[in-house]
Image: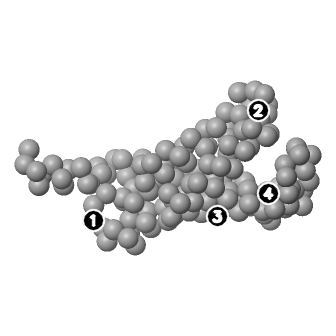
């Protein structure tokens, strides 16, 4: 394989990979928007910021109101970022940190079942994997910053 041909082959993701990244981004983004909306707005039967801050206070999380806002916005804005594929690699950082805190503070004693850590662990690892892989060609990152050329950001 020539050098030029090899360089092209390593820069362009195959369409099935881009489609798979899109599917993963869509469901994970919706899940985070859902949970973030519960915390920020009290939507879908959620506690809202005051209720979420009270829950964090019961877990002895420092600065519970500030922590509630940080976690809720990480989920809401991070979910939108993941869904759209815009700034995913940057927004993945607060989302993954939020999932690590959820594992350590809310779900530390069990892997599965009621109150288990498998859910935030799966979400956190999935977001980390998306950050490593990038948004794919079906994303705003790609449309805005790659001009339709090369590997996805």
The earlier-in-sequence mark between 1 and 4 is 4
The earlier-in-sequence mark between 4 and 2 is 4
Quick one: SS at disc 3? helix
Q: How far across and down, in percent of the image, does residue 142 sit?
A: 38, 65
User: What residue do we see at 73% from left, 56% from top?
Assistant: 71
Q: Label 4: few (<14), some or many (≥20) within 10 Å? A: some
Report if the CB atoms under discs 4 and 3 are less than 8 Å apart: no
Whether residue 52 sits left or right of residue 37 in the image: it is right
The earlier-in-sequence mark between 3 and 2 is 3
Report if the CB atoms under discs 2 and 1 are less than 8 Å apart: no
Q: How far across and down, in percent of the image, does residue 25 sit?
A: 51, 53
Real-space Cα distance between discs 4 and 3?
Answer: 15 Å
Real-space Cα distance between discs 3 and 1?
Answer: 27 Å
Can residue 47 be seen at all in this image of the molecule?
A: no
Quick one: SS at disc 4? helix
Real-space Cα distance between discs 2 and 1?
Answer: 44 Å
Figure quadrant of residue 148: bottom left
The earlier-in-sequence mark between 4 and 3 is 4
* Marking on residue 108: 2
Q: Which residue is mark 1?
A: 149
Real-space Cα distance between discs 4 and 2?
Answer: 18 Å
Residue 139 vs 115, above or below: the answer is: below
Q: Nearer the viewer, residue 100 or 27?
A: 100
* Marking on residue 29: none
Q: Nearer the viewer, residue 100 or 133?
A: 100
Real-space Cα distance between discs 1 and 4?
Answer: 40 Å
Real-space Cα distance between discs 3 and 2?
Answer: 25 Å
Q: How far across and down, in percent of the image, does residue 97 sit?
A: 65, 49
Q: Label 1: few (<14), some or many (≥20) within 10 Å? A: few
The earlier-in-sequence mark between 2 and 1 is 2
Q: Which residue is mark 3?
A: 77
* Marking on residue 67: 4
């Amino acid at each position: 394989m020539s050098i030029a041909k090899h360089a092209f082959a390593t820069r362009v993701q195959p369409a099935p990979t881009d489609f798979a990244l899109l599917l993963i981004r869509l469901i994970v983004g919706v899940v985070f928007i859902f949970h973030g909306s519960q915390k920020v707005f009290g939507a879908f039967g959620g506690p809202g910021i005051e209720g979420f801050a009270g829950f964090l206070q019961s877990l002895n999380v420092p600065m519970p109101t500030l922590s509630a806002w940080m976690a809720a916005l990480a989920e809401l804005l991070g979910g939108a970022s993941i869904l759209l594929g815009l700034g995913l690699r940057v927004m993945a950082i607060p989302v993954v940190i939020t999932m690590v805190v959820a594992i350590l503070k809310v779900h530390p004693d069990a892997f599965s079942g009621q109150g288990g850590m498998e859910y935030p662990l799966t979400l956190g690892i999935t977001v980390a994997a998306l950050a490593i892989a990038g948004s794919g060609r079906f994303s705003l990152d790609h449309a805005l910053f790659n001009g339709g050329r090369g590997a996805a950001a």
